[in-house]
Image: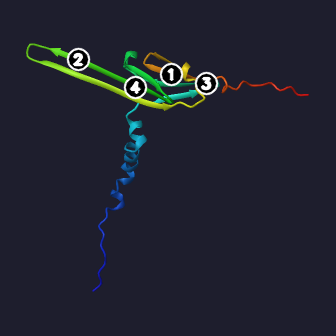
Amino acid sequence: MTLVRFERTMPSAFDFSDVFGEFFNRAFSGTGLTRLFQNAVNVYEDDKKVVLEIALPGVDKKDVDIQLNEDLLEIKVMRKEEREEKDENYIRREFDFTSFERSFHIPDSIDAKKIEAKFENGVLYVTLPKKQEVIVEPKKIKVK
């Protein structure tokens, strides 16, 4: 009598690792989780500055805190809202908390003393001007 090793496996038609595997890998990896639960940040650059653009709908500018610690720019939002409804027979209280935090490493080419922020129509704009020595002005070369 010959013994044959038997392994019970799920048929490939019922293998959900391909379907959900990528989602869970992205969702619970270091950057995936933050990407699922953080506001998107648009970053654009020209010759003189870098601009961060962050959509913060429903947030007031007093709830926004921006700090520069050495070369780390930290943007934090903490909003707390309480609602209370009273009637003869009941009191209903609701609390709503919104929290957002992002950090950016600022390169040496940015003039940290001139960083500005503006909050307009639910969008936060952080302007990071480049240092003068980094800005390259085009130079016209005369052909002889």
Q: Residue furthest front?
A: 70
Q: Amino acid at mark 3?
A: Lys
Q: Which residue is mark 1?
A: 126
Q: Nearer the viewer, residue 88 or 126?
A: 126
Q: Which residue is mark 2?
A: 83
Q: Mark 1 or mark 4, which has the lower sequence index?
A: 4
**Which residue: 40% across, 29% down?**
101
Horizontal arrangement in the rendering, residue 44 relative to residue 80 (left or right): right
Q: Are marks 1 and 4 in contact (CB under 8 Å)?
A: no
Disc ID at residue 130? 3
Horizontal arrangement in the rendering, residue 89 relative to residue 115 (left or right): left
Disc ID at residue 66? none
Give the label, 2 or 1, closer to the camera: 1
Q: Residue furthest left?
A: 89
Element at label 2:
strand
The span from disc 1 to disc 4 (Cα, nearest Å) is 13 Å
